[in-house]
Image (spheres, coloured by chain):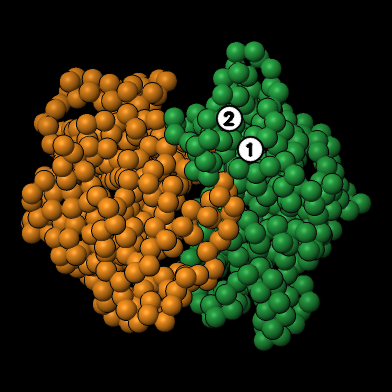
Amino acid sequence: MNSELLATRKLSIRMCSCSGPQTLIGPVDLSVPEKGITALVGESGCGKTVVSLAILGLLPAGSEAKGVISFNGTDLLSLKEKELREMRGKEIAYIPQNPATALTPVLSAEDQIAETLYYHEGLTGASLHRKVISLLESMGLYNPEHVARSCPHTLSGGMRRRVAIAAALACSPRLIIADEPTSGLDSRTRKNVLDLLGRSSEGRAMLLITHDLEAALSVSDRITVMYAGEVVETGDIMDVFDSPAHPYTRALLSATPSRGLIPIPGNSPLLSTIPEGCRFAPRCPHSTARCRLRHPSLTRLSGTRVVRCDMPC
Amino acid sequence: MLTVTGLVRHFQAMHSGSVPVRAVDGVSFTLADGELVGLTGESGCGKSTLARTLLRLVEPTSGTVELDGTQVTALSRSGLRKFRPRMQLISQDPESAFNPRNKIGESVAEPFRVLHGVSLKKAIEMSEDYLSMAGFDMELVERYPFELSGGQIQRAAVARALACRPSLIVADEPTSSLDPSAQAQIAQTFQRINSEHGISLLWISHDLPLLSCVCDRIAVMHAGKIVECGPPGDITIRPVHHATRSPTDIMSATLSDRPPVGVLNEEFYRESQYRAARDSSGTTVRPQNTYSPFTGLQTDDKTRSRHT
């Protein structure tokens, strides 16, 4: 039985916007099983990254998360900063969107990976060095000793990405949050990184935030689609790709080159001016007057398939 | 019409005595009016340097570039300055291509102020046509770049490039930081301006499925040279050079054992049988009635028949 490791219940996030603090994200009901990869997809600005930051307790100052983020039975939102710090890196690790800026430019790759191991596992000296080298080796890097000594700016995009993944895997976390791990990589490096993520996710949970639907399909087991700050569809990835139930999921898939490259008409609403009723209604080809008035709730279609639409396709 | 002949750009490494880096190493190709050509290749193979060299943002070591009968590589500084509007670059990160302190409408109006010397008000009026041509949402002209989504800013960048009335646009990974919907919007915009205005477009990207959907020809670069060039069907189905073969293999079913996004299971299995057959016999004959493994496009697709 693959039970739930991470679950958010009615998570809403209040953030500072131009017109003062406002609830921009939510309600988000997300569930990540104990093993396997869950993909989180949606257009830019729909709140994917903010949700992942809320899980890590790293929201920007002035923001506030409400609801429940339950990780292995603990509510992360009720934890103090000190307790959260024990969790980050050890239980929940994060692979940043842009390793070029997320890695410190003045430290060698080894120092940055070693930091987590030193803090959480108290490793030092030769044993710490051996562990770092073996981690880099398992990333499929050709010359781990050389990479360990290098500063990030001397490494290529794919190598930096692997250093960031190695740092995330260092303490064998139970959950890895990977934010756009394949963006900007060429096709060979992209495949290598995806293989690596697939291998690293064995026996642990991974939340894969991505725009790359092809990549999501190749490695993930489940998928959650977000639109304008809320979850619109969740389900087994093969089911969702075969028969998307929410019109937005359908439209998003149609925008991929393999399904016709058809853009979604209109623009997604700014999170500060969200329409009443169904948030996708103004762009939806099937919307009715009722859709524009009533905000649909998440309904269960079958088993683990959940959709936020009154008239699923 | 763009003609590039034997273009070379070498960089001398910082410590003396070392071998120069041959970023672009003898590239020749032509780009017809209104042709959309994709340029792909691994990271570091010289795609971006080629783009910058043929626009003379980087001086070439040797070789010539000719655009509509003008020798770009022979132009003097002032001549080049006058000629610049004819060739435009659209960059990967649209937000960094705009002045953050100017409203987006003002930035797009800038070419008119610089080229025609008109007032800001008049320039903004003149730019409106180009903004709508690029599919930019006119309600957003009063916004600053940080208030817009990547897709909208990229469309403003397209509008600004069009405002110079160029005959060549080089787009360096214009969609790599965009979500699938914005990617499709930009691809559509490019196809439209390319066919309606007869502008030659060189589109650099890693995304082979995307390129094969929109381009007339695809060129593959490897270690500073163009190693293969042809219609998308040939490149993706019958790659000849090893540098092409590996990304196409990766793009097709080998990404995983699952069928690619847009292909029905039946087609996928037919294709994988074909691949298995090809591997054992070593031939590259494509069976009848199959779709391209990842695009679901047939060879008589409209994007390609346009130029036949």
Q: Residue at x 78, y 63 (%)?
A: B196
Chain identifier, colour green: B
The x, y position of residue A120, in whole percent, is 13, 36
Identity of the residue drawn at 49% across and 60% down: A251
Q: Which residue is mark 1?
A: B291
Is B112 on the left-hand or right-hand side of B273? right
Rendering quarter of residue A34: top left
Residue identifier under label 2: B271
Q: What kind of element bears circle 2?
A: helix
In the rendered picture, chain A carries what hue? orange
Dot 2: chain letter: B
Residue B49 in view: no
Q: Nearer the viewer, residue A303 or A229?
A: A303
Q: Nearer the viewer, residue B82 or A10?
A: A10
Q: Position of residue B231 (x, y in %)?
A: 75, 38
Disc 2 from disc 1: Cα separation: 8 Å
